[in-house]
Image (cartoon, rainbow, N blue to C red):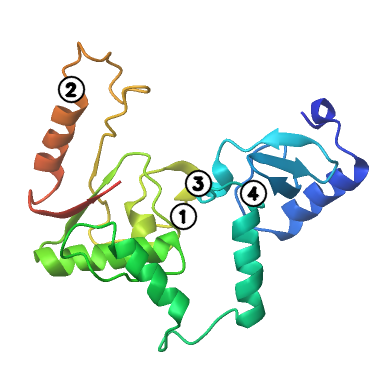
Amino acid sequence: MEKHFNFSNAHKDLIARDAEHVLGWRYAPGIVFEQGRGSTIIDVDGNEYLDFTSGMMCLPLGHAHEELTETLREQAGRFLHENSWYSNPQLIDFAEAITATLPDGLDVVNFTVTGSEANEVAMRMALGASGKHDIISVIRGLHGGSLAVEGLTSIGGARRRNLGPLLAPASAPAIHAPLCWRCPINLDYPSCGVACLAASEDLIDQTTSSEAAAVIA
């Protein structure tokens, strides 16, 4: 595979060093990227690729967006971080911009650092507001790396090996994703009658208290 990509020796060396010293999931070959612009990312050999994943689904404006880059540079020149017990004008403006797009009653933003933490907070809110305890995930759903959301992630194999139960109960309930492109029960839409939803309702009936606090997807 690397011969097909014709990596330089320096690139191969970086791939080897990454494998030895950095813990992370990697596709093969383990390309090492150096920069990006727009929807294009560029490896250390100067080869260009289209970034169909938008970073990790978090770069809707693309790489090196001029206005965003200048805003980040300007803010870094003021200060990079402050104690979360205090606030700043930019944080307030951002919260107001978000809540202005939400339905009435959703007026407060809880800013978190990672997706895992955001999901943990959402789960706490669901449990506290509903008074119920079942949280249902979707098969093949990936929700983060902390223990609670890892316990809801329904991806098997090496990801879960030797971890044991991560939540009480040991097995979190999960339902089918209503994904017609790759039907989880091998039927064809629309003749299937969206049977995956009926199957998921049956899974909820059989594996939960039928009083779910939330579905995480």
Q: Decide: few, some or many residues near mark 4? Use Cα within 10 Å; few <14, some 14-19, many ≥20.
A: some
Residue drawn at (57%, 35%), measured in percent from left and top? 52
Relative to 4, is 53 on the left or the right? left
Q: Which amino acid does label 1 sit on?
A: Asn
Q: Earlier in the sequence, mark 3 or mark 2?
A: 3
Residue behind mark 4: 63
Give the number of the disc on residue 134.
none
Can you identify the residue that label 3 sits on?
Answer: 57
Residue type at mark 4? His
Q: Name the residue under label 2.
A: 195
**Image spot of residue 216 (x, y percent):** 27, 50
Mark 1 or 4, closer to the camera: 4
How far apart marks 1 and 4 lie (CA) works out to: 38 Å
Left or right placement of residue 156 versus residue 217 in this view: right
Mark pair 3, 4: CA separation: 12 Å
Determine the residue located farthest toward the top in the rendered image: 191
Query: 66 or 62: nearer the eye?
Result: 66
Q: Which of marks 4 and 2 is in front?
A: 4
N-terminal label among 1 and 2? 1
Q: What residue is drawn where x is 19% and y is 62%?
A: 126
Going 45% across and 83% down the picture, which residue do you hit?
A: 88
Q: What element carries label 3?
A: helix
